[in-house]
Amino acid sequence: MPHGYSPKKGDIKARLNRIEGQVRGISKMVDEDKYCIDILTQISAVNSAMKKVAVGLLDDHMRHCVAGAASDEEKGAEMLREASAAIERLLKA
Amino acid sequence: MPHGYSPKKGDIKARLNRIEGQVRGISKMVDEDKYCIDILTQISAVNSAMKKVAVGLLDDHMRHCVAGAASDEEKGAEMLREASAAIERLLKA
Amino acid sequence: MPHGYSPKKGDIKARLNRIEGQVRGISKMVDEDKYCIDILTQISAVNSAMKKVAVGLLDDHMRHCVAGAASDEEKGAEMLREASAAIERLLKA
Amino acid sequence: MPHGYSPKKGDIKARLNRIEGQVRGISKMVDEDKYCIDILTQISAVNSAMKKVAVGLLDDHMRHCVAGAASDEEKGAEMLREASAAIERLLKA
């Protein structure tokens, strides 16, 4: 069974590739002794971008839970428990 | 004048390289249709690791502020204002 | 129609009352010129406690979405969109 | 020795009193079975307001560190270590 995020895969991949480039850029800034505050700004940008990817994945997951619950209530409930735990981890990360 | 984080540059670079690898790993997980909750766990790990880098940079920046303020009070105050603004951005990111 | 969190109302109320007391305690610490770092520790505790309440509410909301979607797909989808937006706001707050 | 935040005490107290009222309002919303998503919005507002108080306290603390370090370097360094630890806790809270 394909996962909930499959249709949006291209978009998610594009975001992650951009984030990877941002992290590499931060590494380069450190190499070049750029001003620390500017590096912190880039770190904030990466974390925001990561959270956007996370919200997109969660959204698809929840949609999948709802669809899944129609055919298998037990499985739907289990997926929701996992979603709540994932949200809790994200809120602390 | 070298920035506050220069002595720890190697450690910061190593952390950033690891984070870059983690982001690439997440991208691969999406490619391979891995379970969305497992991907969210990896995203939380990246954000936590990024925040650790940020705290390290901030710590060095503040140390530098204190040292700088001894010779130039105006400059020290400006650096602290920037640090506060950076902390505020991080807390929202 | 009662909301998803109704059965747990007592637990949520107890947590919120405790948080209200914590905020009042922080106010008192400021009055008494307590050490700023100790106040920051209390602020972190309040925000963590608030996020726990939020995760509990979200969990119930999602459960409700799933149940609701069984009888009204359109409504279920709308509730999920709201949940995603709420998660996004929490992650920035 | 008065703490760094003393001059701004009135402003901080006013913010905390407002937050206390917001938490009480959230408790009332739960009592009245308000829509969960609206409650989550209020929780996000409380956490944002709390973080603003935290940034204000940190800003004063850092200013104090700088001033303190002029007369006692050891003490200034210790205060900075505490500030970094407090920032790390806030970023996870």
Image: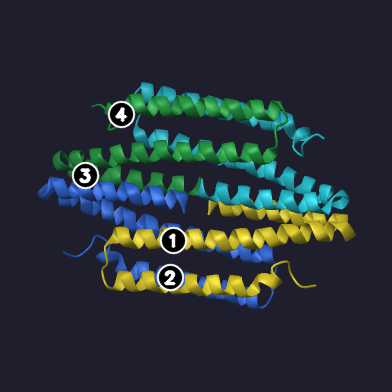
Chain colours: A green, B cyan, C blue, D yellow
How busy is the neighbourhood of tag 1: few (under 14 within 10 Å), some, or many (20 plus)?
some
Horizontal and vertical percent for residue A56?
A: 35, 37
Q: Is residue A88 above or below residue C30?
A: above
Local SS, label 3: helix
Disc 4 marks a residue whose amino acid type is Lys
In what element is the residue under mark 2?
A: helix
The amino acid type found where label 3 is placed reads: Glu
| Same subunit: marks 4 and 1 | no
Residue type at mark 1 is: Ala
Residue at image coords 44%, 57%:
C51
Residue occupied by mark 2: D22
Residue occupied by mark 1:
D45
Q: Among all residues in the image, which is located at the extreme front? A: B74
Neighbourhood count class around disc 3 (C-alpha, 10 Å): few under 14, some 14–19, many 20 upward: few
Discs 2/3, front? 2
Q: Is residue C68 above or below residue B50?
A: below
N-terminal label among 3 and 4: 4
Q: Specify whether A14 is left or right of C28.
A: left
- Discs 2 and 4 share one subunit: no
Which residue: 75% across, 54% down?
B77
A80 vs A14, left or right, is left
Q: Is residue B50 visible?
A: no
- According to the picture, the residue beneath numbered tag 4 turns out to be A8
